[in-house]
Amino acid sequence: MNYFLDSFLAALKLIFQFDLKTYRIVWTSLELSLSATALAAALAVPLGAYAALREFAGKRLLQQLLNTLMAMPTVMIGLIFYGFFSRQGPLGELGLLYTPTAVIIGETTLIFPLIMNLAMTAVQSADARLFATLLALGATGWQQLRLVLSEIRLALFVAVVTGFGRAIGEVGTAMMLGGNIQGLTRTMTTAIALETNKGEFELGLALGLLLLLIAFAVNFLLQNLQRRDVR
Amino acid sequence: MSAYFLDRVAFAYAGSPALRIDRMVVEAGRLTALIGPNGSGKSTLLNLLAFLKQPDEGEIYLFGRRTDGGDLPSLRRRVGFVAQNPYLLRGTVLDNVSLGLKLRGIPRTERRTKALTALERVGLAGFAERPAHELSGGEGQKTALARTLVLEPEILLFDEPFTYLDQASVALTETILADYARKEGRTVLFSTHDRLHGLALADDVLSLFDGRLVNARLINVLHGRLRDGWFDTGKLLVRVAEDITRGAHLAVDPSEIVLSPAPLTSSIRNSFEGRVVIIAEEGARARVTVDAGEKFHALITPESMQRLGLVLGKIVWVNFKANAVKVF
């Protein structure tokens, strides 16, 4: 028990003394997940909205596919891209393996279906009267799209934040594609998984506490947004 | 000049027919009421007239011009449509009222001035900065009316304007609609299931029943079947004109009904004894409802009401000529 308590106190010390090594890892984590989230959102929100507003063959299939992909294990994404990026792989020449870019690509792929699916659902569940109102007021095609997105912006934001939550909390992709290189691809989750083995339990614990803090903050934000959205 | 002319228009929802109109005219510059029971196709018709839906068959002419194949956004911009239970967007009342102007590229200051004037007109001065989702049903509807009026459309369509309103707001909305037609010379068409109200307010009345236009005012509608010059409602036998051979519904124009203390005898007349059950004000006239087995609504002048000494519960006779009976 003493071991646990001592480590816990040491972890708190790392956090409150603003230990450079610890916060460097937090920063790397945020940098990679936020980049992946921005990239995924930029692609998934417009595509999701477009897919929701258009009728086309295979729309149901697309949604089922997105639903399935949401359950993709993170380590599988890591494995697939590892195959692409490794020296013998088709994209091996680019030298992307164990770089931040590789992690960003992997995490973007991981959360893209999630954000697109949620964005699509958000547009589809918008009030049917909204579309008729915009038409009656004389909105053109582009004006409609812009106004619909602005009208459901909270739900879209929830989709993006949910994606961020998944990216920052995942370990499989970051580990397989990033390789836990200090200052470059050592994220909170990979550090917790790998540094603890090297005897740095208090660092793992400090990072774990900070990760929990971020996860809870994101969750708190989501709940508040959703409460504001339901009126 | 007709604002709308409909030629053999039909519309169906997923195969089930909702509307079939052979010919319909809405005169320009007049206040027209579209009356009919719930589910008769009023909202569908208004959606077609607002170019939000396209007819499956037939042709809609707008001020004498064909609209089929026309540019829908520009057609929609000529027609203002206030839906029943309208949708308000996020933001303030002012944001909502200026939205249509914004979509038309009107500069900000001009939008504001026009929107504030429109709000004042619908009795919502001082509501500009209120969040739209905090409004009551009636306030929301008036905001939607202001949002449409501010665009000064050539035609104003309003689906069930009086449903959510209190008495004072009903009077104000009536004045706005009437002024828009009679003072500003625009065309106004509103739907209502309160047929007597529509009749009292409007210049013209269009009656919709089961998705079809009928040449009757749809008040005192009774259901039953025809038998040798008589219409049997199950409770009453109503004498109808001899040339009528088909139909399962009848309607008696309330201003064709004469109330009397004793039956008016004539072979071509219907006379039924009944009790006065409702007396209400309807514009400049009185609306008297008499229960004679079936309920009949009559519109009579205050003078004849006084002359007959009508009070609730009084026994009177409901009289109308056979050719005042419309069968459809």
Image: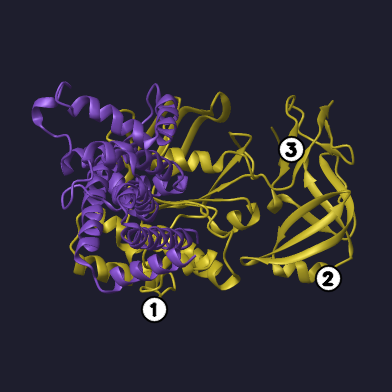
Quick one: SS at disc 2? Answer: loop
- Nearest the viewer among A156 and A134 is A156
The percent coordinates of residue A121 (x first, y second) are 43, 41
**Both on one chain, marks 3 and 1?**
yes
What's under tag 2, amino acid-wise?
Gly
Tint applied to chain B in the drawing: yellow
Q: Earlier in the sequence, mark 2 or mark 1?
A: 1
What's under tag 3, amino acid-wise?
Leu
Specify the quadrant that holds the C terminus of chain B.
Answer: top right
Q: Nearer the viewer, mark 2 or mark 1?
A: 1
Q: Which chain is purple?
A: A
Is B262 left, or right, of B116 in this rendering? Answer: right
Q: Earlier in the sequence, mark 3 or mark 2?
A: 3
Residue A23 falls in which quadrant of the image? bottom left
Residue A183, compared with residue A76, is above or below; it is: below
The percent coordinates of residue A194 (x first, y second) are 31, 47
Quickly name the residue at label 2. Answer: B309
Mark linked to residue B250: 3
Colour approach in the figure: by chain
Q: CA distance from mark 3 to mark 2?
A: 29 Å
Residue B271, compared with residue B145, is above or below; it is: above
The percent coordinates of residue B227 (x first, y second) are 84, 26
Q: Nearer the viewer, mark 3 or mark 2?
A: 3
Specify the quadrant that holds the N terminus of chain B.
Answer: top left
Mark linked to residue B126: 1
Q: CA distance from mark 2 to mark 1?
A: 47 Å
The chain ID associated with circle 2 is: B
